Image: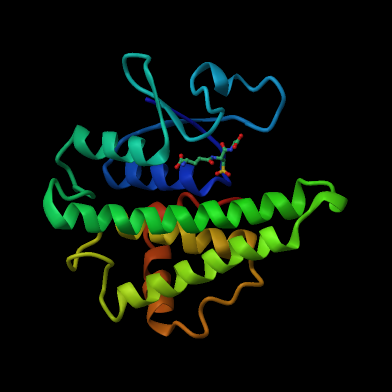
Amino acid sequence: MILIGSLTSPYVRKVRIVAAEKHFELKLELEDVWKPGSRIVQLNPLGKVPTLVMEDGGAIFDSRVIVEYLDQLTPVHRLIPEKGRERIEVRCWEALADGLMDAAILARLEATQRPEAQRSADWIERQMIKVRAAVQAMARGLGTNEWCCEGKYSLADVATGCALSYLDFRFPEIDWRTDNPALTRYAEKLFRRQSFVDTLPPSA
Ligand code: GSF
């Protein structure tokens, strides 16, 4: 299977970590989706990464769909519970983490890609409010537990780790650690996992 992506996208990283935890070898093909004429649109009309090309040549996209596909391909190390309330809890943690990444990326695009005269400080602040609220919700939800859901490592932890690590990568000025010692201890343990170490983004 071929994963089209970049080394800096937190959504791509989520997929790569899930693949590593499931012992799948994905061939990573780098694609700059911002480059005019990027061939990503031939596989994904939305022009976004991650996009996965499956064994039969079909393409699927959106990190949430791809991780679901990978998780159900083999019973090895299930990261998403099969049904019920537990499944919904894991997916809600993922939505929270993805939402943090969405807001952080929108704020960053506004601040770095838009011509200065057109930038909206209000828009950036609106997104940063979401980022801070998501961190607080993560800290509250985790409490002093070892993992986000049901006492075991799951997609909820993969997604949460990718979101917090993205803040470290692109927003080093955001100090989410000082007021959240339990979340900090949790993240440090998560960041030491081989799958996280192997997918660290290159330094900015
Ligand atoms: C988000 C993917 C995304 O925005 C997912 O896969 O979970 N909900 C989707 N990817 C960005 C790259 S990045 O910022 O991580 C992307 O491909 N953007 C190109 C564009 O034209 O928006």
**The C terminus lies in which quarter of the figure?**
bottom right
Q: Find residue 127 and report its image quarter.
A: bottom right
Give the vertical position of 202 relative to 1 (above or below): below
Q: Is residue 84 left or right of residue 138?
A: left
| Residue 195 picture location, percent across and down | 38, 52
Residue displayed at 48% across by 49% down: 199
Splitting the image into four quadrants, where does ligand 1 fall? top right
Which residue is at a point 53% across and 71% down the rendered structure image?
132
Q: Quadrant of residue 144?
A: bottom left
Q: How is the image coloured?
A: rainbow
**Identity of the residue drawn at 49% across and 19% down:** 43
**In the image, is residue 68 above or below residue 87?**
above
**Is residue 130 or residue 25 the one in the foreground?**
130
Numbered marks: total: 0
User: Could one spot residue 154 in this view of the protein?
Assistant: no
Q: Which quadrant does the N terminus fall into?
A: top left
Q: Where residue 155 appears, x then y in whole percent? A: 30, 53
Q: Position of residue 188 (x, y in %)?
A: 42, 72
Residue 158 or 82: which is nearer the viewer? Answer: 82
Left or right position of 140 against 123 = left
Q: In the figure, 17 relative to 173: above or below?
A: above
The residue lying furthest to the right in this view is 117
Asked if residue 59 shows in the view, the reply is yes
Q: Position of residue 182 (x, y in %)?
A: 37, 81
The image quarter containing residue 60 is top left
Q: Residue at x 74, y 62 (%)?
A: 121
**In the picture provided, is 108 more to the left or to the right than 63?**
right
